[in-house]
Image (tube, helix red, strand yellow):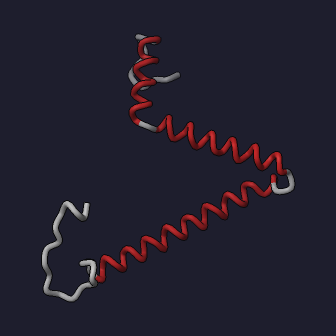
Amino acid sequence: IGGLFPQPPSASSSSSNGSSPHDLQQLVRLEQIAKGSEAEASRLLTMEMSPFIADEHGTKELRGRIRDWLVNNTIRADPEVRDAMGRALGRRRPGAPPGAWN
């Protein structure tokens, strides 16, 4: 997007890339929040997997099921997929309200 919108010339002192000190502070803060969130997610995943540490087969199975769940959840959350499923189920159940899957 930066290439689409030209930066207005400014007489104030700014860094070499045209970002203001406030913008740089916000980027640093955002980076810290992202790193903290990643660390927290890793810690929680490690804690959830602790019962399977001694069982290598169980760990592999759990990782596979988590991966499958993430893929399926991502696909089902896609608006196009939800619309397509709603249309397909709507043909099977003509009296059902829109968005009723069950």
Compared to 83, does 42 lie above or below? below
x, y percent for residue 77: 47, 38
Residue at 49% over, 23% down: 101
Camera-side residue of 26 and 3:
3
Asked if residue 11 lies left or right of residue 68, the reply is left
Camera-side residue of 101 and 78:
78
Residue at 30% over, 83% down: 21
Q: Specify the farthest residue to the right.
A: 54
x, y percent for residue 31: 45, 72
In this rendering, the count of numbered labels is 0
Asked if residue 93 lies left or right of residue 24, the reply is right
x, y percent for residue 34: 49, 67
| Image quarter in which the N terminus is found | bottom left
Q: Specify the farthest residue to the bottom.
A: 13
Asked if residue 57 lies left or right of residue 94, the reply is right
x, y percent for residue 8: 13, 74
Q: Quadrant of residue 78?
A: top left
Residue at 73% over, 60% down: 47
Residue at 70% over, 47% down: 63
